[in-house]
Image: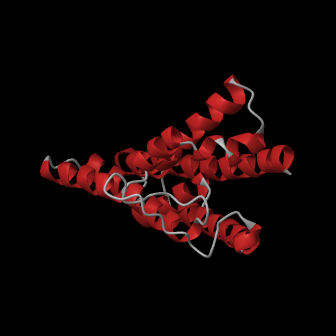
Amino acid sequence: MNTPAHVVLNMLCLGRQDTASVLTPVIFGAVLPDAPIFLLYFIERVLKGTPEGVIWREVYYQEGWQNFIDFFNSIPLIALGFIVAVWVNSKIGMALFSSMFLHMLGDLPLHHHDAHRHFFPLSNWRFKSPISYWDPAFHGDMMTRLEILMVIVSCVTLFLIYQSVPGKVSVGLVGLSYIVYFIYVFTVWM
């Protein structure tokens, strides 16, 4: 799934209370697994001027980047973080790591050749799903449509559930970021 889709789904599943103490770690936990990819893109595209195709066909698959990305997508490391959060009784930590784990559950069945090593550093195994959230060769067109529908329904539902202005604004910002992402995709990658 695209990052804004992870955010809104995690808000719907874990952030039904529209308070900053709940929403902030849920949102950060939904974004954190993709943060290394944002950094990779910023360094390669913005700072180095690397062409899009080279970034996604070559640089993304370099061992150093894969290790960095998979560190943030590691179920054992996220579980360890959650256990520490429980041990120190950190509700923020528990929400953060729960949100990261939910992100993993969303990614696991939706990546094919770009699958993460979700059991890194214990294993280099990758589950190469027959379904991709983006690749048309693996039902990406259908998955994109389903994701868009899920984001719209989730945003509307959360907007109706949330009573606070910050809660409604956070839903609006996630929806706006999703729209901006697709504008970028259609102007740069298509």
The image shows residue 171 at horizontal and vertical percentages of 57, 53
Give the side of residue 120 with respect to residue 132, left or right: left
Q: Is residue 17 visible?
A: no
**Residue most extreme to the top:** 47
The image shows residue 20 at horizontal and vertical percentages of 40, 45
Q: Is residue 20 visible?
A: yes
Viewer-proximal residue among 100 and 22:
100
The image shows residue 16 at horizontal and vertical percentages of 42, 62
**Residue most extreme to the left:** 87
Q: What residue appears at the point 60 percent right and 66 percent down from the top-left corner?
A: 112
Q: Give the quadrant of the N terminus.
A: bottom right
Give the side of residue 92 with respect to residue 70, left or right: left
Q: What residue appears at the point 54 percent right and 58 percent down from the top-left corner?
A: 6
Q: What residue appears at the point 52 percent right and 63 percent down from the top-left corner?
A: 107
Q: Residue 49 appears in which quarter of the rendering?
A: top right
Viewer-proximal residue among 56 and 175:
56
Give the side of residue 22 with respect to residue 56, left or right: left
Q: Residue 43 appears in which quarter of the rendering?
A: top right
